[in-house]
Each structure stands twice: as structure tokens, then as C-alpha cells.
Image (spheres, rainbow, N blue to C red):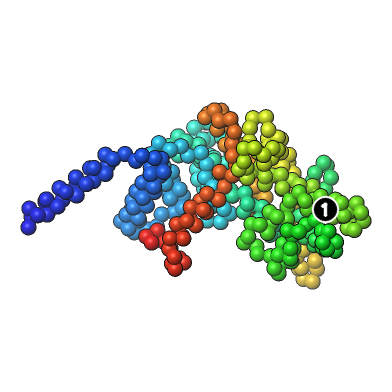
Amino acid sequence: MSTSNENQLEVDNNKKTRNKRSAPETWKQNVRKCLRQSGKECFFESVVKGRRFTIEEKILSLSLYIIKFCLIIVNTVCDQSSVIVGAITELVQETKATYLRQGKEWRPEVMRCKGHVVVPLYDTPHLIKGIGNNLITKDLSYVTNNEEKIVKWDYFKMVYDADKSYAELRLLNKITEEHINPEKINEMRVKSATQLFIHSVAVVTEHLTARGDLPIECRHLVDLTLLIDDLFDSLNVNSLVVKYFKGPVKRNKPHHELWKKAKLVLRTIKFIQKVTVQGKVRLVEKVVQSVTNLIKTIEAMELIWQILSRQYRLDLMMTRNFNEDPLENLFGNIRSYGARNVAPNTRF
């Protein structure tokens, strides 16, 4: 009986040896192997220690395994989940403390892992969606060209109604009640906001205001709409041939000037909400995390461009590769294999 067990053990060891010696043929196999090993070891350690890993430990653990397979981590990307944002903030603060203790110059909003600088990003489409959702219930104040302007959700409603009155001659055919009516807006859909902050909405608003079909105050949303539209294009580049902000980021392209201008305007944005206290209506300023994280994302994208162009000698950068779309598509493909299983986990 013992001989049989020893023979079986020897066969298993030979299989493991052959598997270790057989090197992966592509980098995708390296990534899959890395994820499999990291998942197994994390699960094993959590069972042994009798506790769950924190988000910070999971990020660092997975980063170490990726670096182990000779892949270079440049950035992370996440949505605005409070748990994830808290974990990223803690890792950034730990890195900042390490820099200050060593007397080094501190780079804003970066993490370090095995000597690699990792830049945290927030998913741009989700940031635009967050700004749009907050604008439904709050007024937005911003400063551009030394002039303060206020944008209200009612202005978008006025533009929609004025454009709709032209029936078949209307220009904003893609804008529907699902974009304007708060009761019909799906706040989880990114398109509800990104299709509203587009160039054609700004053009139609300017045209209808000049004709007298809209009050002059509606012009306040023109500059903001154009800025968000250009900013979204520059942070969502996926084409080599398109010019201006939809084209790739290069050394002498206008993206860099746009990002500088956008940061100046975004830092002046204030969301104002009407609050009733003891029968009196008061205006209260609200801090919207989407604006703060959008500024951080712009600064992070500038830093990533410096790393890629100076350290790795790259001539251009496709910014869409840094958002969550590739991950969401991957998870969608994995989820499609579950068929009727609508709540898959790591085991199935």
C-alpha cells in the first residue's frame, strides 16, 4: 500500500516538474498563470490565518505577482466605490510617508510597489456620469475667463423643449426624455450624461439663445458642455487617424493645453444645493467627489504620459486603454459562460 502511494506521489511530482519547465508561449498565458497562482495562494492564506484580506493587501499582492512575471505596472484604474477609493488613498498616503521619511521629492497621487511607480486612475466615463447625476439635484457654479457662471438642470430642459418644438427640423435627435426627465433618467447608465455633454448641445444652445428662443442665462452651460466634451474625448482616445482631442496624445498635441485649462476651471466648480432648515431655505455648498477625482485623473494622465514618453520612449498614448472598458469586457465574456448562473464567483 505504501509503495503504491509513493509511486503515485512520484508521478504527481513529475507532472509538476514538467508543468514548471514548460514556459508560457505568450504574455497572456503569463497573466492567466499569475492570476491563477495569486488566487490560490490568497485563498490558502486567508483560510490559514482565519481572516479576509483587505483591499489594500489584495492590490499589493496581485501587483507583486504581476511584477514577478516581468510585466511592468504603470497604473491602476477603478470606479468611485468608497471602499476602493479608501484603499487607494491609504496606499498613496503610505507611499507619501515613505518618501518623506527618506527625504525624497514627493510625487502627488502615486503608489510604489517593488520600486515601480504605480499611478492610480479613476474611470473617466464614471466621473462624467457622477457630475451629471449631481447636476440633476444641485446647481453648478464655475469660473471661466474671470467670469462666474451658474448652470442649472432647468437650462437643459429649456434647450430640449425649444429644440423639440421644431419637430422634424430639430437638431438634437439623440436627446430624449430619458436624458432630461429626472424620473426617467437611468443614473447607472454612462450614456445618460455623456450624450448630454456634447458639442451639438452647446451649438444648439448658442443658436437658440441668439434667436431669442431661450433666456440669456442658458448660455452659461455652453462653456461647461464644451469643456466636458473635449475633456472626455481627450481621456477616451481610441483612434490613430482622428485629429484634435479624439486623436492620440503626442508631444505637441493640444491635449496638454486642454488639461491645464480644464484643471483651472474644475478647481472653481462648486455644487450648490437648496436645503430647508426650520422653514428657511439655505444654499449649501456640497463637495462632489467626481470633480475632485477628475482633477486627480487629469494629473495622473499627465504623469503617465511623462513616464511613457521619457522612460519608455513612446511617441503616442491611447487614453482609452487606461479606463475600465477592457476589464468590463473581459468580465462580461467570463460571465457569459455562466449561462443561467447570474451570480458567478471565482470558483464557477
Query: Where is residue 228 shown, x and y percent of the image?
Result: 72, 48
Quadrant housing residue 251? top right
Q: Please give left or right for residue 176 compared with residue 342 in the image.
A: right
Query: Where is residue 149 shown, x and y percent of the image?
Result: 82, 50
**Residue at the image position 19 percent from the left and 46 percent from the top:** 13
Q: Amino acid at mark 1?
A: Val
Query: Where is residue 182 shown, x and y percent of the image?
Result: 72, 66
Nearer-the-camera pick, 219 or 54: 219
Nearer-the-camera pick, 2 or 8: 8
Q: Please give left or right for residue 107 compared with residue 227 in the image.
A: left
**Total label count?**
1
Nearer-the-camera pick, 200 or 281: 200
Look at the image and tell me in which quarter the C terminus lies: bottom left
Quadrant housing residue 239? top right
Q: Please give left or right for residue 40 compared with residue 87 in the image.
A: left
| Other residues around mark 1 within 10 Å, as few (<14) / some (14–19) / many (≥20) | some
Nearer-the-camera pick, 5 or 292: 5
Q: Please say whether residue 65 is visible from this viewpoint.
A: no
Name the residue tied to disc 1: 204
Look at the image and tell me in which quarter the N terminus lies: bottom left
Which residue occupies the extreme front position in the image? 168
Quadrant housing residue 250? top right
Which residue occupies the extreme bottom position in the image? 279
**Residue at the image position 55 percent from the left and 50 percent from the top:** 325
Residue 115 sits above or below residue 203 on the image: above
**Residue at the image position 45 percent from the left and 34 percent from the top:** 115
Q: Please say whether residue 21 is visible from this viewpoint.
A: yes
Q: Please give left or right for residue 96 compared with residue 152 in the image.
A: left
Local SS, label 1 = helix
**Residue at the image position 80 percent from the left and 50 percent from the top:** 202
